[in-house]
Image (cartoon, rainbow, N blue to C red):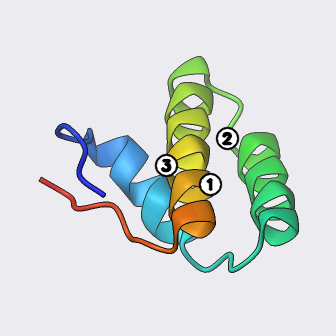
């Protein structure tokens, strides 16, 4: 799966969320990240990383990072 350039903050969260191998684990990890990072910019990056990781889990293909 290819995507446009990912900003560094989103990339950092995506790499952390790649440990999740199921959607349930992804949800749990995302909630923990959101709880630990209350800034709006971090929340936005976490949400974007969640969407990317969800697509990766469902498709079985990792996102190509440009």
Q: Is 13 on the left or on the right of 2, as rendered?
A: right
Q: Is 10 on the left or on the right of 41, as rendered?
A: left
Q: Could you tell me which residue is drawn at 50 percent across and 23 percent down?
A: 41
Q: Nearer the viewer, residue 59 or 12?
A: 59
The reply to whether dot 2 and dot 1 touch (C-beta < 8 Å) is no
Sequence-first tag of 3 and 2: 2
Q: Nearer the viewer, residue 54 or 60?
A: 60
> What residue sits right under mark 1 in the picture?
54
Dot 3 crowding, Cα within 10 Å, few <14, some 14–19, many 20+:
many
Q: Secondary structure at mark 3?
A: helix
Pinpoint residue 4: horizontal percent, then vertical percent. Answer: 19, 37
Pinpoint residue 65: horizontal percent, then vertical percent. Answer: 20, 58
> What residue sits right under mark 2 in the picture?
37
Q: Secondary structure at mark 1?
A: helix
Q: Could you tell me which residue is drawn at 86 percent across and 61 percent down?
A: 28
Q: Could you tell me which residue is drawn at 47 percent across and 58 percent down?
A: 14
- Looking at the rendered structure, which numbered label has been put on residue 52? 3
Dot 1 crowding, Cα within 10 Å, few <14, some 14–19, many 20+:
many
């Amino acid at each position: 799966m290819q995507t446009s350039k990912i900003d560094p903050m989103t990339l950092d969260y995506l790499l952390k969320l790649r440990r999740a191998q199921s959607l349930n684990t992804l949800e749990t990890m995302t909630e923990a990240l959101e709880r630990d990072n209350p800034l709006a910019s971090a929340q936005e990056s976490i949400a974007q990383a969640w969407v990317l990781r969800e697509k990766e889990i469902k498709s079985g293909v990792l996102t190509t990072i440009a």
